Image (spheres, rainbow, N blue to C red):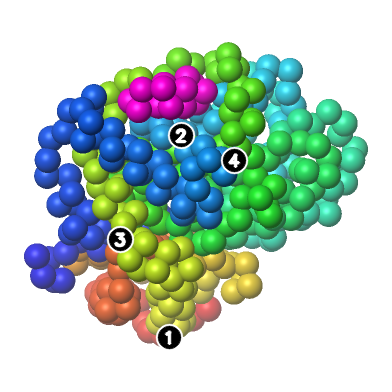
Amino acid sequence: MNHRQRHLLFTPGPLTTRESVRRAMMVDLGSREEAFLEVVKAVRSGLLEVAGTKPGAGFEAVPVQGSGTFAIEAALGSLIPADARLLVPVNGAYGRRIALIAERLGIQTEIMENGETSPLDCRALQTRLAATPGITHIAAVHCETSTGMLNPVAEIGRLARDSGARFLVDAMSSFGGIPIELEASGIDALVSSANKCLEGVPGLAFAIVRRTVLEHSEGVARSVSLDLFDQWKTLEETGQFRFTPPTHVILALRQALSELATEGGVPARAGRYLGLQRRLVSGTRDLGLREVLPADLQSPIITAFHSPKDSRFSFPTFHRLLAERNLIIYPGKLADTPGFRIGTIGALDSGDIDRLLAGIRETLEELRVPLPLES
Ligand SMILES: *Cc1c(COP(=O)(O)O)cnc(C)c1O
């Protein structure tokens, strides 16, 4: 396939993948056969390596079938006991989703609303912790994908540790693309999925959990299929999943993890994403588009833009005209600001960003929106 025909996904996942990753799926393996169990083992240790640790060093990688949300639900439901009290700092849709899941699970949940475009207020969090005795767990999002904001997990982790609370992190859209230190950030459990910065295909998520926390979670889970403890025990004892694993997805993930290592690991990938995001924003500024976040709060993962004010602009048409050029962008996810989002993760290079920028220019011209846009 040449570049003109390739579908380029500028989304937060599923993403543009390498052909080698898609090719890795072209074999049917029995889920109980040794050949597949080897793949599962390699993937579990590969995930620990991306997390900056290794097998036997205090953390366990527990894969969960399904999309990322399934692993969030598995982690909250398996690691937070019935008598616990959870605090969730919220600055976007994904923080709200954590709280929604926790409440549905019957977990006593406190929400700390922060607003969507200002940085997460750690002093307010500290005050809230001091004023609310009995908080046993904190759960927060690393990269809040609804705006692209990077939250200060190391600082939140320190506050959690100081107050004796366990710390769970939704690192869905950052794991593999932004370095994260489990110990230094006081993280007890981190959740992500195969199809974001790891550049695999969708269908598998995972939790990376402090071993001592996992060991004490027997019988906590509110669900059979989403029981992290049972999933882990069975994998440890038999090497097998309890229920049908997405064999092809796991083959693709093994290939994707090896491509990540070849690229130079997380720091190299983070550097590529940052270069793509800077190139994007420099081009969109030339067109007069405005980002939602100030540059110092912006992650290299995904950028939220305000919709142009011109009445000839319509997002559905803009989206469709770009999609006709095989350029896929995402709608906005802010509660009260119309806009759209452009992801800069996945198997993309600077030429792909230039193709997108050219497509955006052509599309705005087709919509007869005068350029550069007025801010
Ligand atoms: C993508 C994403 C999720 C949800 O993942 P699904 O795979 O759609 O279930 C959760 N949290 C964050 C921060 C995300 O970016």
Q: Which residues are magenta?
A: 227-241
Q: Is mark 4 within 8 Å of ligand 1?
A: no
Which label was assigned to residue 58? Answer: 4
Q: Which residue is mark 3?
A: 259
Q: Secondary structure at mark 2?
A: strand
N-terminal of the two: label 4 or label 3?
4
Relative side of 92 to 110, left or right: left
Q: Position of residue 287 (x, y in %)?
A: 40, 82
Q: Is residue 189 visible?
A: no
Which label was assigned to residue 286? Answer: 1
**Residue visible at 46% across and 54% down in the picture:** 50
- Which tag is nearer the camera, tag 1 or tag 3? 3
**Residue visible at 19% across and 67% down in the picture:** 325
Question: For the residue marked with disc 3, what is the amino acid?
Answer: Glu
Q: Which residue is mark 2?
A: 62
Is 228 magenta? The answer is yes
